[in-house]
Image: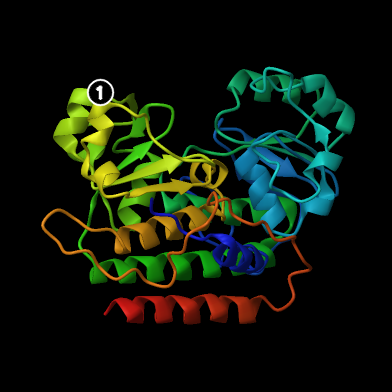
Amino acid sequence: MLRVSLAPIAALLVICSLSAAAVPAAGGTVQAGPDCGFPYTAQDATGADVTVEERPDRIVVLGASTAQTVWDLDAADRVVGAPVDTTTSYLEGIEDREDVFREDRFTVNQEAVVELDADVVLAPNVIPDETVASLRDANQTVYKFRFGTSLEFIAGKTAETGRLIGACEAATGTNEAFNATIEEVEDGTDDYDSPRVMYFTDNVTAGGGTFVHSLLTTAGGTNVAAENGVQGYGEINEEALVEWNPEVIVVSGVEGGVPDTPAYRETYAVQNDQVVTVDANYVSQPGPRVLIALQTMADAFANATVEGQATPTPSPTATATDGGEPTETANGDGAGFGFAVALVALLSVARFARRR
């Protein structure tokens, strides 16, 4: 089965993510340029004008992707509350933060948030407006991010986060590395035929208008669900699966794999061992580390065969591993990110050159 080694990619990207060009958030009011002073006011997803009076020393994050972004802006030391569970376990030191969710893992523990007395509370779009309003009634400064379905949205969210927490320089460097890597991936897709791909997680696939669709197509794949009219996320119908006949199946998870049914066994992807696993946290969380999932997909698509095509010689970037679990690298102090960005670019050029 096709497997891609993530350790070197993960290490490089985590280093790069400590660096940071302010990119306008989708529908946001983030200020560009060097000004990162306070007080700062911006309109959030609820339509409220949220004012952060001074650089926050105490930050609460109410979502895994928001936590990931703050970590990658080298501001983890200022986070006092966050979701502490499997969705954030890859973030160094997360276990030392106050867990701000109840046991059901869906409901915010508002009492815990209020007790933390944060300077700003950062909420992803999935947090209900009612929860945001309730926290504001308790004198909490809450900024709710907008909903996004694209890689461009992530860059905007990173810039917006940097402005809200006083980490503009880090956000600028992170976005420069982020956008450069996307451009390199897109340039590399010219070197191989686009395989028909399908995303799989718990018998659900991603169609058009989804964040995962943006990843699949940027990596050079043709999303069979979207091509067949699926919008949003939907349950996989095995009759449709046989008709779609994906050449690569992207599985969200750690171990990977698809159901052992006649319909799946009949697909070109399963018959040719072209099922690739991406880390569930990276592929589902719109944060800077989504690049790890993106490059995993791009490498898999580049090395995949398509119907009527001879088997290509695998590139050195595709190697066998025990499980495809990315290796996390601890955040540093942000020094030396220029070298890391240059190294990522050098490795990308070398990888794409091998395909020509």
Can residue 30 be seen here? The reply is: no
- Seen at 37% across and 71% down, the residue is 315
Residue on which the image places disc 1: 237
For residue 261, side relative to residue 127 (left or right) = left
Name the quadrant containing residue 172.
Answer: bottom right
Mark 1, secondary structure of its residue:
loop
Question: Nearest the camera: 342 or 297?
Answer: 297
Could you say where residue 299 lies in the image, as x and y percent from the top left?
38, 62
**Which quarter of the figure is the C terminus placed in?**
bottom left
What colour-coding does the image apply?
Answer: rainbow
Question: Nearest the camera: 58 or 272?
Answer: 272
For residue 7, side relative to residue 236 (left or right) = right
Could you say where residue 31 lies in the image, as x and y percent from the top left?
59, 58
- Seen at 52% across and 38% down, the residue is 146
Give amino acid for label 1.
Answer: Asn
Could you say where residue 319 lies in the image, as x and y percent from the top left?
46, 64
Q: Residues within 10 Å of mark 1 (few under 14, many from 20)?
A: few
- Seen at 38% across and 66% down, the residue is 185
For residue 305, side relative to residue 216 (left or right) = left
Could you say where residue 49 lies in the image, as x and y percent from the top left?
63, 37
Can residue 354 be seen here? The reply is: yes
Question: Nearest the camera: 62 or 27?
Answer: 62
Name the quadrant containing residue 337.
Answer: bottom right
